[in-house]
Image: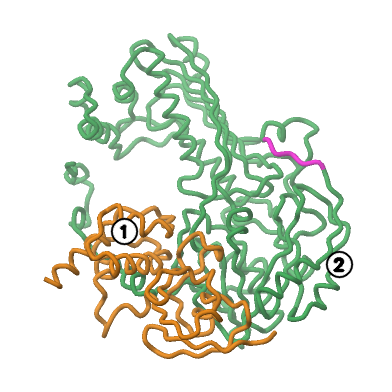
Chain colours: A green, B orange
Amino acid sequence: MELRKDYFADVRKDGLHEIGQGRPRLDSPGHVTGKTPYFADRNFPGMLHLKMVRSPHHHARIRSIDTSEAEKHPGVVRVLTAKDVPHNVYTILILIQIGPEDETVLADGKVRWKGEAVVAVLAETERAAQEAAAKVKVDYEVLPAVFDMEEALKPGAPLVNEYHGQNYYLYDSGECRKVRFGDVEAGFAQADHILEQSYQSSPIEHAPTETTGCVVAPEGNDRFTCYTNTQAMFFTLDNTSIILQMPGSKLHFVGGTVGGGFGGKVDVIVEPIAILAAKLTGRPVCFIYSREEEMQISSPRAAEKVIIKDGVMKDGRIVARKVTGYTDAGAYSRHSPYGAQKGAAHYPGPYTIPNVWIDTYCVYTNRTPSSAMRGFGVTIGDFALEVQMDKLARLIGMDPLEFRFINAYRDGDMKAHRQPTEGAALIECMQEASRAANWPVAEKYMAMSSYRKGA
Amino acid sequence: MAKVPVQFTLNGSEKAEFVESGTTLLHALRDKIGDTSPKGGCHQGTCGACSVIIDGELRLSCLTLAETCGGADIRTTAGLAEGGVLHPLQRAFLDGFATQCGFCTPGMIMAAKVLLDHTPNPSREDVVEALSGSICRCTGYEPIIQAVLAAARANSQNAA
């Protein structure tokens, strides 16, 4: 395949010539010799192991917690509950104004999803921590739970998260993120055909080979070094500082080596409680998810539902597109309000459509909190949009690739969320795809360009 | 809990440790002896990241009890390079971009070494079969397969 190096030639100022050259990866020598230091390769004398007692219920009130038997278990050093956490209620994106704080480090009075952390047990060995965790007695009053986004949005649905007060994230634009461009109803009135379809997806687990975790070493001067596989070092620093009410200068995070992340390690879950445990015991602490925890407890990609209604002309032009997107945040926000918002900007797809209406909702349910994963807010939307494009092409009897050429965005086109298109390469990409896949299109499409001189 | 003495050679050097009965070889190697090249990905024998070579055979160290390894000859990826010179498999993984996050790499290299020790000129199918117990979640299997085949070619050229 030909690399179109000259395409951005006029905007390139860097003088780099690396594309097409093989360059050794800096981390490979460590990988092939087994010397790359992953967080769990750190071992400190006297290191304690942290295990979580987790909620067996999807939604329940906690009547009481009895840790007395666990504390007596041989090897147990300390048992932590919500009252030990200085600032127990947090939300990861608070410093970029995505609030309110809605999630507890350790459950306080209520659990909102099956697997939620309730009590942290610290012991000399992993086995002792596990055995003691099984001896913690939590008395639950089970509450009705809701698992379906549309059910959650109905009046009278169980309230998932009191910090929000309703089962959706309240944006400054209201109950959803909205994009309004042109007049979508006029577009539908003018269209030769209208096609409305619904698409949905299940949560997806990242399943990294290295499970989520961290190792914390107290430095003896009230500073703590935390070796972590976080993908979000500065969210971790900020949130730990808030949760522990501790200046960032006391916290030293060492990371950057991640044994597979895929977006699954951007939440701040293990570090604050492990650092607190190291502070309260004065001992190094290791908190590593088991494989079961990685699969069941760590945030998955959100389940999504996307409803797309399009108006299309017989000549192939899409004249109106209305999208309603639902993102299942699970019980807590984490990164999902941002994901749903990203979807709002993305949903018209890489197509220029004169009339667009988009609503995207971030919905709370009693499911495992979802969060980031590879293009979250966009990937499922793309699946829905491109299946919809194929269906539209079939509806008007047009080749699906030619149909995309007709609607492709080009430089200078105004996008629905009012960003002018710049540096679009969709046409050129599809021309290459047409050649590579031996899927010929009419010559007029092969002569098109995204690039408009003077645009 | 009662501790059991265990003695074996690791990459050619004698090691002696006292371990609790029931301690896995993975735990003994990583946390007691300090060879962290075998990785713990699942602790249930499904991911292959902990693979080591015991008496010439590929073994999952997370399912092997340390106390059963008395007198064994244990090899790990950490001991593969000799005098600072990479083993042909390590060289081929490096040159062939066969690592991504790197977490599965030591286990993959162990599985590949056992294959090449027994089958110096493997077919592609032999390589796929030999690596089938090792999961690469980054899904970089193709460069890994190519690297093993390249290492086999390099070995046979050196031997010729």
Task: Give the image location of residue B9, x and y in percent.
Answer: 42, 86
Amino acid type assigned to the residue bearing label 1 in the image: Ile
- Quarter of the image with the C terminus of chain A is top left
Q: Where A341 falls versus A134 (above or below)?
A: above
Between the residue at mark 2 and the residue at mark 1, the CA separation in whole angstroms equals 51 Å
Q: Is residue A348 left or right of residue A127?
A: left
Q: Nearer the viewer, mark 2 or mark 1?
A: 1
Which residue is depicted at the point 42% across and 72% down? B52
- Label 2 amino acid? Asp
User: Can residue A253 be seen at all in this image of the molecule?
Assistant: no
Q: Chain of mark 1?
A: B
Check disc 2 and report the residue beneath it. Answer: A66
Disc 2 and disc 1 on one polypeptide chain:
no
Residue stretch rendered in magenta on the structure: A144-148
Q: Are marks 2 and 1 in contact (CB under 8 Å)?
A: no
Is disc 1 surrounded by few (<14), some (14 to 19) or many (20+) residues within 10 Å? many
Judge whether residue A306 can be spotted in this image.
yes
Which residue is under mark 1?
A: B144
